[in-house]
Image (spheres, rainbow, N blue to C red):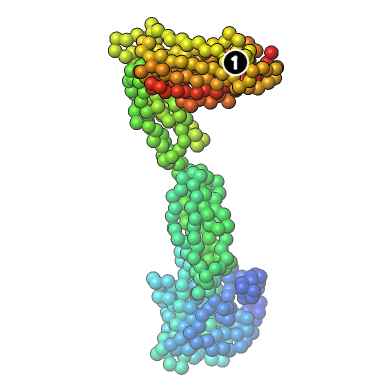
Amino acid sequence: MKNYFKKFSIMFVMALMFIGIGMIENGSAVNAAITADGWQRYDDTDKRLLYTKNIMGSISSVHYNGSTSVIIPGESVKFTFYGTKLRVVCAEWSNKSTKNVIKIDDNISDTFSSYHSNSGSVSQIVTYEKENLPKAFHKVTITVPSDEVNKNLELDAIDIDNTGYLIGNNESITLDKSTMNLNVGDSHQLTATTTPVGAQVTWKSSDPSVATVDSTGKVTGVKEGSCTIAATTADGLTATCVVTVAKENKWISLNKSTTNLTIYDSETLIATTTPAGISVKWSSSDTSVATVDSNGKVTAIGAGTATITATTLDGSNLSASCLVTAVPKGNGPTPADSENITNIAHAKGDNTNNPGGEVTIIFHGSADTTLSVVKTADVKEVWIGDNFTYTLVITNTGTKTAKAVVVNDPAPNHINFNVSGVTTTQGSVDSSSTSKNIIVNVGDIPPTGTVTIKIPSTVIA
């Protein structure tokens, strides 16, 4: 390595302009300055320079900050800096070592000399210079060999590029992850480990539109892309993690895309979601052909085709569908020519809440069972504006199951039904129900089975 002997006479040094930069570290001033040629200079007494044995050197106005540190044979100084270039500034003299060893990281080992034959005056020189280093942290050790008897190195200052900085050899920061994959909307905690333990850390994202990070290191994906999350100590030590954000892999599927059902029969479709457990809403494109309940149970009502759809309720609105084809049972009657069994029930008691009103009970197919209907009101006399409840009790009094039962209850002219308040012990209220007509898709009623429907009502005239 070529030695750089850049002598500075006393007058030249006095004329050299240093621009001081105010820095505070751990409550004490850091002795650093920008040299006239654009380097950042740190004095030999800087606490981040660790000597195995430090002896006070000469004191002269020639020296930076007025003094030097002597490194004797067998001793060394260590330091770590962040930057791309390095200079070692020493005092030259006739008793100085000619083969000082400098090691940078694990791949650079050079020697340099601070010897000068002229012992009549003390000069300040740049004894070593290294540029074009990777922009990173570099560990440096300078040693005077043991065989340099009666010789030494008189260190005056360390220069680095003006965008770099020295750090203490006992300081460090690491993250538990160097890379991270997130879905949009997901979060993950980064953990910083520092030396000394508990050092204050500042978190920052290179692109908050892709991923954000809070004051504790919690990273949240915002949109597709990649960015770098940095954790920085008060001394400028930084550790980073590259975050890649992707769209969340959400989907929904059904166990069947098509199915055939005989009229009055049922089948339960199964929805599978990713992530698992997303709630879904079921719907039928034609309830006159097939209905579906909140659990995916599909019942064929009339001949034809209908699309049963499951839609996610987490805001993604993903959907999957199954085409249902409903066909007649054997050679029996179809809905068009089936016999509709109608039972008529009147409200009990002396009330006039439902004069002449009737409840129609319909099941498609042959009349192979009988149903009874009782309709009651919880009042005897009402006035305009009064609220009361109709109760319908449908009982299968036959010995066979009543298939696909539908209850149709028209309201008297002076009564309005409260559709949203209707309850049933079986089945569901049809979406076509109005304040003037309640339709309940009860489904199958087994022998002796009973279904109770309650309809809140209001007198309007």
> How many marks on residues?
1
Q: 369 or 203: which is nearer to us?
A: 369
Residue that protrudes farthest toward the right in the picture: 384
Disc 1: which residue: 349
* Residue beneath the point at 45% across and 13% down: 362
Residue 265 visible in image? yes
Residue 54 location (% of width, % of height): 52, 86
Examine the rendered structure and indicate whether residue 345 appears above or below residue 91.
Answer: above
Residue 291 visible in image? no
* Residue beneath the point at 70% across and 17% down: 383
Q: 118 or 387: which is nearer to us?
A: 387
Q: In which quarter of the image is the N terminus?
A: bottom left
Residue that protrudes farthest toward the front in the picture: 349
Residue 215 location (% of width, % of height): 58, 57
Q: 296 or 32: which is nearer to us?
A: 296
Residue 236 location (% of width, % of height): 56, 66
Q: In which quarter of the image is the C terminus?
A: top right
Examine the rendered structure and indicate whether residue 449 appears above or below residue 186.
Answer: above
Residue that protrudes farthest toward the left in the picture: 330
Residue that protrudes farthest toward the bottom in the picture: 150
Residue 433 location (% of width, % of height): 54, 18
- Please name the amino acid that badge 1 sits on: Gly
Position of residue 108 in the picture relative to residue 412 (left or right): left
Q: Quadrant of residue 16?
A: bottom right
| Disc 1 crowd, CA 10 A, few/some/many (<14, 14-19, 20+) | few
* Residue beneath the point at 64% across and 18% down: 380
